[in-house]
Each structure stands twice: as C-alpha cells, then as structure tokens.
Image: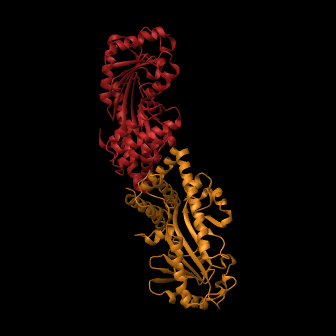
Chain colours: A orange, B red
Amino acid sequence: MTENMKDSVISTRVRLARNLKGIPFPSKIGAGQANVVAGKVYEALGKGYKLYNIARLNESEAGALVEKHLISKELVASCPFGSVIVGDDETLSVMLNEEDHVREQVILSGLKLEEAYRLVDGLDDRIGENAQFAFSERLGYLTACPTNLGTGMRASVMMFLPALTITDTLMQSVNALGMLNIALRGVYGEGSDAIGFIYQISNRRTLGLTENDILGLVRTAVNHLSEAEERAREFLIATREISVKDEIMRAYGIAANAYRLSNQELIRYFAFIKLGAYYKLIPVKRVFALDELMTSLQPYNLISAADRPLNTPEERDVYRAECVREALKEIVG
Amino acid sequence: MTENMKDSVISTRVRLARNLKGIPFPSKIGAGQANVVAGKVYEALGKGYKLYNIARLNESEAGALVEKHLISKELVASCPFGSVIVGDDETLSVMLNEEDHVREQVILSGLKLEEAYRLVDGLDDRIGENAQFAFSERLGYLTACPTNLGTGMRASVMMFLPALTITDTLMQSVNALGMLNIALRGVYGEGSDAIGFIYQISNRRTLGLTENDILGLVRTAVNHLSEAEERAREFLIATREISVKDEIMRAYGIAANAYRLSNQELIRYFAFIKLGAYYKLIPVKRVFALDELMTSLQPYNLISAADRPLNTPEERDVYRAECVREALKEIVG
C-alpha cells in the first residue's frame, strides 16, 4: 500500500456468501436444520475457533460482536437460529444462518485485499470439503438474495475520508467512480452527519465477474479515493489552516482531559486526532492504535472489558473518558 | 489573609475622590482649568509617574488602561479634558477630571485593604500638600456626586466566586450582608452570565463613617463571602464531582491546545482552570499568574503588546491562543 493509502485506509474485509446444498435458505428452516449447517461448518474448522449461539449471548456480548463487525445487527435482531464461529485472533469468522447459511469473512488492518481474499478462500476450501455448497454452473454460488449471486463475494475497505467530507467533495469523487459500480456507506452516519468521517467502500456486483475482477475494482476505487482525499487534505490545510488546526487541537485537548466522553464525541475527536497525526500536529506513535482503541470503547465492548459494572450511559461515559485519558498518554508522546 | 481568602480574592483597590477648592466640578470647566488641576497634581508627584492626556491616546492605548482598571470607561467616553497619572509599576494612579477633579487609586494583588489604604493615603497627603481640597467640616470631602461625599473613599475587592455562582447561592450570601451596605458587581456580566465568576465587592456608603470603618466593613464582607465560597466549593465537588472535573479539564484541554480563542472563552476557561488549581486537579504553579495573564490578553492590552499588527478579531483570537498555549506550559507543570 502506498503512503497516501496508509493515511486513509483503516481495514479490509472480504466475505463470501455460501449456502448448503439440499437445505432451504435460513428464513425457511428451523432449529434442527440450522444446527446441521452450524455443525458441518464448525466440524470443518475445529481447533482455534469458537462457536457462539447468538440466542445464548446477552445483549452486551452480542453487541460487542456487532461493534467488531464479526456479526451483523440482523443476525441478532431477526435470526433466531443464528450463530457465529470466530477464529482466535478474530481475523477469520463465519456467520451462520443469517440471510445465507454461511458467511465467511476475513478482516485485516490496512489495505490487504489479496491477502484477505487468499485467507477467506482458504477458509472456503476447508468448509467446502466438509459441506457441499449450492452451486450452479450458469449462476455460480446460489444465495438467498440475488445481489450476492455468483461469486457471493463482497470486498470492502473501511476508509477514513475527513478532508473529502469537510470540503463536501466526497460525492463528487464517488460519482467519478460511476462505471465501477462501487457502493459507499457512512459507518457512523451519512453525509455531513458522518461524524467519524469513516466510510465503507465495496463492490455492488457479485455476478458476471471473477473474484479477481472484484478485488481489482475495489482496489481502483480505494486508490482513486485515497488520492482525492490526499489532495483534499492539502487543499484544506492551505485554505483553512487555522480553523482546521483549531478543531484538531481542541478535539485532542478535550479527549485527553475530559472526565466524561460520549461515544459520539469519541468518534468525532478521534477522527480529528487522526487528522492531526497526518498533519504532524499531534505526535501519534501508531495511528492504528487509535482505530483499535475506538473499537474497544464502543458501548458494548466497553461494558464487556470494563473493570466494574457500567449500568448507565453516565457510567459508560466516565469510564470511556478514563480509558481515553490513559491511552492517549501512551499513544501520543 | 487566611488560606480560604487567598483562593477567592484576586485584588484590592482603594480610591479616594477629591476636588480642588475654588475650581468648579469637571463637568463645568474647560481645558484651561482642567490643565490647572492636572498640573497641580502632577507637580505634587513628579518622578516615577507618567501623565497621559486621554484625548491624545489612540483607541487601543486608552482601552488598555480601562482593561487594567487604571481609568474608567467614562473618562474615555465623556471627559474631553480627562487625563491620568500612572506610577511606574501601575500600583498607584490618579485619574483627573473625570466626575471629580482627582481620583487617587491604589491596586494591589490579593487582600490588602490596610496596605492599599496606607498607600493611597500617602498619595493623598502628597497631592494635598500641593493642592487645597474642597472640604467641609460638616460633610467631609466634597464630591460631584453625593454618593462619594464624606470620605470620598471606595474600597473594593475583586473576588473569584465560581462555586457560589454555579450553585446559584451568591445572592443569598450577599443578602446576608444586608446591614453592611455592600455593593456587588459582576466584572464580566451579571448573575448566570458572570462568565469569569469575578465580582467586585465594595462599600456603598462613604459618608458618616471613617476610613477605618469602611475597611472593616469590606473586610467583613470579603471574609463572609470567602467562607461561603469555600463551603460552596466543598458542596460542589461533593455533589457534582464528575461534572465539575469534566468542565474544568475540558476548559484546560481547550485553552492549552486551541489555535484561536475569543476573549469570552479565555475568561471562561481561565476561571475553570483556577477552580481546577483549587481542587488540585491542575498543577498551577502561581494562580496570580493566571490573573495577570488574563488581563494582559484582554483585547486592547493584546493589541498593545503584540509582536505584529492585530487588525481583525480573528487575528486577535489567533494571537491570544498562541500566548495562552505558551503561557500555560510555564504556569502549569
């Protein structure tokens, strides 16, 4: 990954949708068949993986998995027989009996499309040896929703695009990608409400192209947006230097000192601290540490990891601020 | 001064109003007689003092004197023949041809009523040797406004009362002083708009009591308010610990990092930093340095002291933030 990509790419995710031959799609099955699906997949993986039955998790445990992007909100909300298998380091995971029987996923820090695909493809091979996938020579892998048909693959890259957002030129840059059929989604709100300036870029099409085609499309889009973001960052500091520096340093000053910090504030201030690291205004030692910290401080992860019960939003905000004050001393220096 | 007074007293000011016998009050005279007044007083003081003719000062120079409480706004706005004599260290000053011919003043840091009176009395003696004051055996010193008649003395103490303000119990404490006839005035706005939590406490009566009576009254009032403030600070931290710490540390975080700071923000944040010093949340080396810094960063003082022209509010806010960032590194450590 080139230098400018490093400044705007957070993580890469590749997932493959699969269904087992001879078993109806998850919306049509009961606990019995759902268990067959989960059993076959878990058997294929075994050691180094844990299976979680979503119905048996409490709200915080399930919420923490959603915040880490290991499962979807839908799995928790509307899939009574849903479960997930998570690899020890949480890089590999398989969501079971959500919209499709099997959703194999790999998440890696930074821009690592090929590596992520290689890993998920290996996972797919192992599962495929133990379970026959529903596959058509003409259509490819069969999925519950036609938008996933064919490769069943979604390659997505989480990008940090503050300057394109602030200068209101993000949609312009995305529209220039028109032919690539790329989807862009704000991770914490859309448009001017995209408080953390974080977006997910992914392929819309899964049918009629190869896995490598998809990786290429997404890579092209990420490259284009990285370059546009880099130019926008130069423009921003050249045209609004004081106002940008002021906003960055206030965000840092508050985050490093506050005694209570809402999740919204956390997302907002960390975005500006990262921008401050880019402009070398704030001596951040490891930018990825900020991303990791932010995930670990999302509401449910916070509850799971806390050294004391956090029953109210106020208690969570106080604990979050404590963690941020301590962590920033380490990360900034 | 006791410890608790130290935490709530900023400075002491004593001023004496005098008029010269045989010359009409300033509102009734022209340049000629006003010069006679100024000449007689300046002659009495001489070395170590500078005379400024207000009409010859530019807006910033005059504004800077107002911000340092060396002259009144009225002297600048509506006294065409007004002038001021300022001692080298700005402790002693004499305002000339404002409402009265002569307003002798001493300002000292901290609570120093007796010392301030002794100094202003010495000044009064020197001036009185060279100029005969208008004096009545029955009424005392004659003044343009009857509220100054008698001693012509106003003893005032600048107090920092954040907890009484935040807990909305300041008026209650002041009302308990009813019989003392004490005036309380917010220095930067009144009531809940008193952004810096700074108030001036002074005697209302000047007639029918001695100078020592006045010093005693003001001292009693200051003592009472200091104790009430100390109790309110204990109550505040006991009942709203997180919210108070949060507000203090955010104020510090912003002040120490911002790239642009309005005067309103400065006043507000410095008030919270001082409160943070009291609670030992912020290791402030010298609290008086914060008070001095705040005065030096008021708009006109800022313009006068700056190393470059500050023509717009934006330029002033940027320069103010620069000064604050640098100064806080020295003052907090």
Where in the figure is residue B111, as x and y percent of width and height? 33, 35
Going 47% across and 52% down the picture, which residue do you hit?
A: A279
Where in the figure is residue A16, as x and y percent of width and height? 59, 78
Asked if residue B134 shows in the view, the reply is no
Asked if residue B33 shows in the view, the reply is yes
Camera-side residue of B15 and A52: A52
Going 48% across and 57% down the picture, which residue do you hit?
A: A274
**Residue B223 position (above or below residue B74):** below
Question: How many dots with numbers?
Answer: 0
Report whether B72 appears left or right of A79: left
**Residue A53 position (above or below residue B47):** below
Going 34% across and 19% down the picture, which residue do you hit?
A: B49
Image quarter of the N terminus of chain B: top left
Report whether B322 appears left or right of B283: right
Camera-side residue of A213 and B76: A213
**Residue B274 position (above or below residue B96):** below
Q: Quadrant of residue B207?
A: top left
